[in-house]
Amino acid sequence: MVSPGILLVDKPGGLTSHDVVARTRRAFGTRKVGHAGTLDPMATGLLVIGIEGATRLLTYIVGADKTYTATIRLGQRTTTDDADGQILAQADAGAWACVDENRIAAGVAALTGAIAQVPSAVSAIKVDGRRAYDRVRAGEDVQLAARRVTVRRFQVLADRPGDGIRDLDVIVDCSSGTYIRALARDLGDALGVGGHLTALRRTRVGGFDVASAVGIDELAGAVPLTPAEAARRVMPVLEVDAEEARDLRHGKRLIGQAGRLVAAEVAAIDPEGLLVGVVEARGKDIKSAMNMPEGER
């Protein structure tokens, strides 16, 4: 029997997130594998994979804040807002006249904090049941609505001018649902020269870091985090005794114990260090929101 767990994978460029899931299924001999947050084929970095019953934890991971490093190329707009698309426009020499470090800094500042962001038309967002990128590929004109996201850090690490372009190496801390391609596009538009993404790497998802991830060729020998280890990185913990663990696993409430919870969602862990599940307050009681399957803790 395959043990449940959370596996951290450093996705290489050129593979889809589904490709990584498929390889993980083969490596672990199970179909029950999922991931917490898609990475485009061009992107590299951290993909959080759930195996067996630990896939239930992915719901609590997918919404975590993330960190990316990226390269934004100013001076060119593309059909996909990244290097995989065709160049739509190239900035002429006159457009660069007003672009300097101060204007770039102001443009970055304007895209930091709580912002309304229009995702790229080739995103994985569903429009009437179909992925936006599928509709674009079918020749449709896709217009996506703006959504509120939070960019906690948008910092230029290096500024490398070139022939008719300017490459910015950046680091971004952001809320789930933020599109770094859209930041590149919007920064370029604000500066009047256009922009797109030429490199993207995800280095952190919540409490998980790419430094602890395995490469795509190391899946067969990889040891996933246990559900309890993973849960401790995602949310606060409630240590429960054996009787409380049994009650929660049987769907019973812990009467009058809601005051023990320090957050809306808390991982309940039993005396053996096994994850019982995720619990929440229901009135004055504690109730299970998600239980790990029997034998998969």
Image: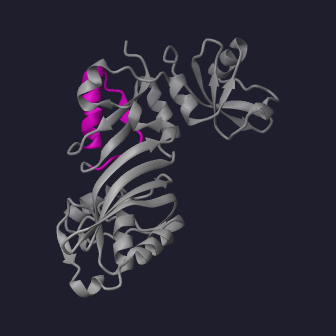
Please, which colouring scheme is shown? one colour
The magenta span reads 16-40
Q: In this rendering, does residue 88 appear at all?
A: yes
Give the image location of residue 158, x and y in percent: 35, 60
25 falls in the magenta region: yes
Q: Is residue 246 above or below residue 55?
A: above
Q: Is residue 170 above or below residue 161?
A: above
| Residue 186 falls left or right of residue 230 | left
Outermost residue, bottom direction?
Answer: 94
Q: In this rendering, does residue 127 appear at all?
A: no
Give the image location of residue 211, x and y in percent: 39, 34
Front position in the image: 84 or 69 = 69
Residue shown at the point (44%, 49%) measured from the top left: 67
Give the image location of residue 154, x and y in percent: 46, 60
Q: Quadrant of the N terminus?
A: top left
Front position in the image: 296 or 231 = 231
| Residue 185 falls left or right of residue 245 | left
Q: Is residue 14 above or below residue 289?
A: below
Q: Quadrant of residue 238?
A: top right
Residue shown at the point (37%, 40%) measured from the top left: 46
